[in-house]
Image (cartoon, grey):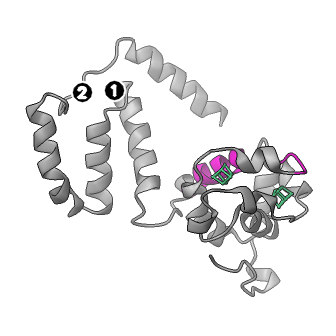
């Protein structure tokens, strides 16, 4: 885990980033954080995170945009809501993690060669194209873009699954895909 107190000149901080987060639905709650650390203490994933949820909130408030968006923390969040239910200020930290993930993808600042952001993008693409999430293809595409050699390790298992008919290489699209596309488009227009 890193310390969030890396020294930065005021001019290097991105105050627009904190303003943006405060203006996002749910993001305004970061102003209420009293830095008690309960969220990090109850988070089952905190040991693996580079910054605790408390640190992320503190850094986001100060304008440490690069550090927050390239952090592993939002991607390691398991959405267990333990932080949210235990926060004395009722801050919806889990939702803030989602807001940060979305922003990290939009700005292309997520941690490189880390499979989860890549998987999230591939998942969205597949659902847009097919209306469903073919897990095998999702895993193969994510591995190809982050660690192609891992595909070699997966090959024997893939062959076994293919033999037993548990692995689909071609995925059919859902019925009513055009309606789904329209729904997704209107959702995108509201975000
Ligand atoms: S538990 Fe709530 S108030 Fe305490 S540090 Fe975390 S977000 Fe802030
Ligand atoms: S929701 Fe995420 S950040 Fe909150 S306690 Fe669970 S894993 Fe940690």
Residue 90 in the magenta stretch? The answer is yes
Q: Which residue is the site of mark 1?
A: 130
Q: Residues within 10 Å of mark 1 (few under 14, many from 20)?
A: some
The label on residue 44 is none
Residue 105 image position (x, y, % from top left): 53, 53
Q: State the residue at coordinates (59%, 49%).
A: 102
Mark 2 against mark 1, which lies toward the viewer?
A: 2
Q: Earlier in the sequence, mark 2 or mark 1?
A: 1
Residue 38 image position (x, y, % from top left): 81, 59
Q: State the residue at coordinates (19%, 33%).
A: 167
Q: Which residue is the site of mark 2?
A: 171
Nearer the observer, 8 or 48: 48
Residue 43 image position (x, y, % from top left): 68, 56
Quadrant of residue 143 in the image? bottom left
Give the image quadrant in which the ligand numbered 1 is located: bottom right
Q: Residues within 10 Å of mark 2 (few under 14, many from 20)?
A: some
Nearer the observer, 185 or 51: 51
Instruction: Locate the C terminus and report the quarter of the image it occupies.
Output: top right
Nearer the observer, 64 or 134: 134
Magenta stretch: helix, strand or loop mostly: helix
Instruction: Locate the N terminus and report the quarter of the image it occupies.
Output: bottom right
Circle 1 SS class: helix
Do tag 2 and tag 1 residues touch (Cβ < 8 Å)?
yes
Q: State the residue at coordinates (76%, 54%).
A: 21
* Bounds of the magenta segment: 88-104
């Amino acid at each position: 885990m890193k310390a969030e107190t890396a020294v930065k000149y005021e001019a290097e901080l991105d105050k627009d980033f904190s303003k943006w987060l405060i203006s996002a639905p749910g993001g305004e709650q970061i102003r209420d954080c009293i830095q008690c650390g309960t969220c990090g203490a109850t988070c089952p994933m905190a040991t693996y995170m580079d910054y605790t949820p408390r640190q992320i909130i503190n850094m986001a408030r100060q304008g440490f945009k690069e550090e927050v968006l390239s952090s592993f923390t939002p991607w390691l969040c398991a959405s267990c809501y333990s932080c949210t239910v235990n926060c004395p200020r009722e801050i919806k930290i889990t939702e803030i993690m989602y807001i940060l993930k979305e922003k990290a993808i939009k700005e292309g600042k997520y941690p490189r060669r880390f499979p989860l952001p890549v998987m999230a993008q591939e998942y969205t693409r597949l659902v847009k194209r097919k209306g469903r999430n073919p897990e095998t293809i999702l895993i193969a595409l994510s591995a190809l873009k982050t660690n192609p050699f891992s595909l070699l390790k997966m090959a024997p298992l893939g062959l076994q699954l293919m033999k037993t008919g548990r692995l689909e290489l071609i995925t059919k699209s859902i019925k009513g895909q055009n309606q789904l596309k329209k729904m997704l488009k209107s959702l995108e227009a509201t975000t």
